Every structure is written in C-alpha cells, then in structure tokens.
Amino acid sequence: MSIVSTTGLTRRFGPVTALDGLTIELPPAGVVGLVGPNGSGKSTLIRILLGLIRPTDGQATVLGSPVSSARDYAPRVGVLIEGPAFDPGLSTRANLASLARLRHLSLARVDAVIAQVGLTDRDREPVRRFSLGMKQRLGIAAALLPDPELLILDEPTNGLDPAGIVEIRELLRELGRNGRTVIVSSHQLSEIEAVCDHLVVIRFGELVFAGPMAEVLTRSREHVDVAAEHPADQGRLRDALTAGGWQVAVVDDVLRIAAPAERAADLNRAAIAAGITLSRLVVAQDDLEEIFLEMTGRVDGELADGRAAAHGKVA
C-alpha cells in the first residue's frame, strides 16, 4: 500500500494554478525528499495532505484514507512545518509533556523523543535559551510524540551546526529504516541526496520526477573542471577549448567541461597547446544539485521563463 497517493491532483487559487494534475505514489518506509524551486507548489501539496486545504480537482489519500477525511489519519502523522512555537518560559520536558497531555499520549513518549533528538542534557532548560537549531530539534521531538507512521518535516536541519546536521541526518535514516515514511522538504540538496531514498521534484505545480534516488542519480554525468594558473588567461582558455570543440560552461569562476575522466589528459594538452598552464584540473560527477538545476532551471532568467510558460502557475 502506498503511504501517499495522488491522482490528477490540482489546486487553483482563483486564476492561479498551484498544482496541476499531480500524480505520485510514495512507498511505505524510507525518507522521501520533496524539492522544487520557490513557488513550485510544495507547500500547497503538504497542506492538502494534512487536510488544511482541499484540492480543486483530482484525488489524494494518506495512509489509505482520502484527504477529505484527514481526521481519520491525523493521529498517525507527525508534522514540523515552518518555525515551531513553544512556551519560552517552559523547559523542553514541560513543553513536550503539555503537548502529550493535549493529544492524550503517554508521557513515556516524552522521554523517548527527548533521547531521539539529542536533548537529554538540555531537557530542564527553558526554551528561551535555545538557539534556532535547538528549537528545530525540539520541533522534531514534538512531531515524533505520537510515534507516527508518516512524518512530514519542512527544513528540519534549519539553523543546525554541522554536527547537528549529521545527527539529524542519522535520525532521519534510522526512522526510515525502522518502517516510518519521512517526507523532507528542503532547499539543502546535499542533505536531500545524503539522506533520502526517494525523490519528488515539482516545478511550478507540475511533476518533473518521482522515483528512487538511485534512479535520478543515474542522470549524473562526468565533467572536468579546469582553471588557468593566471586569471587573465581564463577567457583565452575558454575560447581555445570552445574552438577545439569542447562543451564549456562557466561555474563559479571555473571552466566546466562536459567530458569523461579519460579525456582529462586531452584537455591538459589542449591548454598547453594554447600556451596556458593549468592550476586546476579536477574530474567530478554531477551531484543532485547539478541534476536538479538541469531539471528545473539554472538561473533566475530560466526560472522566470518557466513561470511564464506555466501560464501563471505559482504557489
């Protein structure tokens, strides 16, 4: 059974189409990345799945129940959307205990989730002393209180330091391995690539890709990054390589050549023939960010053209 299923899911706000015929199936267990440029409909999709807004057309089910009956599955869903709000004068433990009582949950869950998110040593401190990253941990703990089958997290690593990001990454992987489905919406594509088993890419309300992360990464291509020893030679190097038939792009002041690793020596010889010494020659593989940009648009101009082509569809 699919944990989340949509068929032709459409949502309009007056003349604006936020979602346009979205059809997806999310498998049980594992971590699902939900990504797309700003204004692509990710938040609209999440709100529909939570029963906060109704679709204009199409169908959607969560945990086997239609979104029109969200009360049927709400107790089995944990959510962290936007900035979590807590009583700043209360401690971690007191805030979570209050939420547990409101939801008629066992107070034993409070100890369990505090340990899960790494707040055991800070559980007696008032929340007003917490950094943004600590509040994010507390928000994830609150989402885990009902021991949910489906967990929906929006930017779960927001504000965390590198060590905290690694801890939350491991937590999400563990949750997925233990049978939960975790939907993570994030702009940090390196984290999405590191933690997710499944990926959904939406571009201006339309589905671009939905499937295993391994499948989307098969679109990855090898490339070679080169740079001239002297910055003044960079333009001349680009012209020489282009004239030699190489496909050249400029990425962060480096020339990126679409070529496999075995052509690196040829590139070096082409630079030498042009009288240019290289300070950098690195063979690399496209990461998820590069693939995502190819799918959705690389610069603001491309994104603007995409929005115009989508006839005003935003979210």
Image: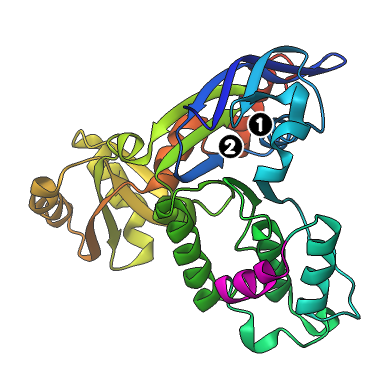
Q: Is residue 252 visible?
A: no
**Residue type marked 2:** Gly
Residue 194 image offset from top left, x and y in percent: 40, 56
Q: Which residues are magenta?
A: 106-116
52, 180: nearer the viewer? 180
* SS under mark 1: loop
Residue at image position (36%, 51%) is 235
Residues marked 2 and 1 touching at CB (< 8 Å) = yes
Q: Is residue 127 visible?
A: yes
- Crowding at label 1, few (<14), some or many (≥20) Cα neighbours within 10 Å? many
114, 111: nearer the viewer? 111
- Give the alpha-carbon distance from disc 2 to disc 1, as whole Å: 6 Å
Circle 2 sits on which residue? 36
Q: Is residue 132 left or right of residue 213?
A: right
* SS under mark 2: loop
Can you tell which quarter of the image residue 11 is in?
A: top right
Q: Is residue 26 left or right of residue 118?
A: left
